[in-house]
Amino acid sequence: MSAKVQQENGEVCSSGDASLLPHLESLDRMLKLPVVDATWQQTQNVYGRVKGYNPLLNWAFGTAEDVVHRAVTISAPLVHKFDRPLQLVDQTVVKGIDRLEVSAPIIKEQPQEIYNQAKSKVLGTVKPYTEKVCELRHASQQKAASLKELSWKKANEVLATQYGSKAVNGVDTTAQAAERLLDYYFPKSAEDVEDDNAPIPVKEDPVLHTVQTVGRLSNKVARRVYRTVLNQIKCLRKEDVKDYVATLIAVLHLTSYLNFLNDKRQQQAVEDTPSAPVSASSSTASASSGSSSNASAVVATTKSSKTLQQTENGSDERTQ
C-alpha cells in the first residue's frame, strides 16, 4: 500500500514539475520518435526495478526525487524569465528534427525494423567479398587436388617404366631384408600385434605400393624397438648401472686427455720463437707427464670399478 502511495505521489510530483516548466515542442517531437521512446521506456523499467530492489535504494532514490522536485519548484520563476530564448532554441531544434526526418527517414521506423534494415545493408555490402573469398578458396582447393592427382599420375608413369620397376623392386627387396634383420635382432613376442595388411599390388598403383611398404616397415620397427627398450629398462640391474657409470667416467677421462694433447699440439704449432726447441722439449715432457697421469687415472678408475664389482659379487655369494 505504501509503495502504491509513493508511486502515485511520484506521478503527481512529476506532473506538477511539468506544469512549472515551460512547454518544449522539441522534447515532445523527440519522445515521439520510436527509437527514443523505446530507449526511454527501457530506462524507466530499469530505474523502477533498481529502485524497488531494496528498501534502502528506494529511500535513496525517493530522497533524490524530492530534492529534484524542490529544485525545480525554486528555479521555475527564473526559468520563466528565459521563456523567449528557450522558445527560439526549441524552434531551432524542431527545424533540425524536421530536416533529420527528411534526410534520414529510417529514424521514424521501429527499432526492430531499423535493425533489420541495417543488417540487410551490412550483409549486402559484405556478401560479394565473402563469396569472392569462398570462390578463391574453392578454386585453390580444386587446383591443389588436380595438381596432386597429376603428380601422382606422373609418379606412377615414371615407376611403370623399366628403371622405375627396378626401383620399386629394390624397395621391396630392401624392405624384406630389413624385416628379416628385424626379426633376427628384435624377435617377435607374444604381446606384439603385427599389421597383417599387405600392400596393394605394384601393378595397380606403384606409388601407393611403395608408400604402404615403407610405412608398414617403419611402424614395425618402431613397435619392436620400443618393446625391446622397454624390456631392457625393466630388466636393468644395479650392477649394470655401476658398470655404465664407471665406463662413462673412463670415457670422460680419456676425452679430457685427448683434448689436453690437442691443445698442446696447437700451442706448439703457434709458437715460432728461437727458444722453440727448448719449449718443444719442455712441452713434450709436460705432455708425456700429463698423458701418463691421465692414463694412470683411467686405469685406476677402471680398476676401482672392477674391484668394486668383484667385492659386491663376493658379498652376494657369501649372502647366498
Image: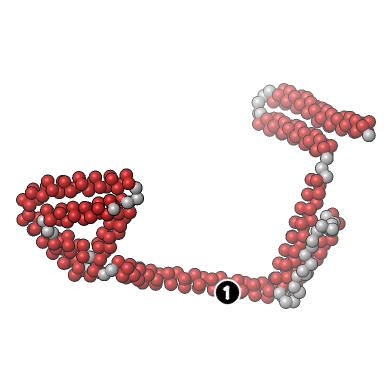
Q: Residue 193 vs residue 129: left or right?
A: right
Dot 1 falls on a residue whose secondary structure is: helix
For disc 1, the neighbor class at 10 Å (few under 14, some 14 to 19, many from 20) is: few
Task: Find the residue positioned furthest to the front.
Answer: 1
Front residue of 74/309: it is 74
Residue 258 spot, x, y in % from top left: 75, 34
Residue 265 visible within the image: no
Residue 26 visible within the image: yes
The residue drawn where x is 16% and y is 67% is: 98
Residue denoted by label 1: 146
Image vertical order of residue 226 relative to residue 129, above or below: above
Quarter assignment of residue 154: bottom right
Quarter assignment of residue 165: bottom right
Residue 290 spot, x, y in % from top left: 76, 26
Total numbered badges shown on the rendered structure: 1
At label 1, the amino acid type is Ser
Residue 269 spot, x, y in % from top left: 68, 32
Front residue of 141/177: it is 141
The residue drawn where x is 75% and y is 64% is: 216
Front residue of 318/29: it is 29
The residue drawn where x is 79% and y is 56% is: 224
Residue 52 spot, x, y in % from top left: 32, 51
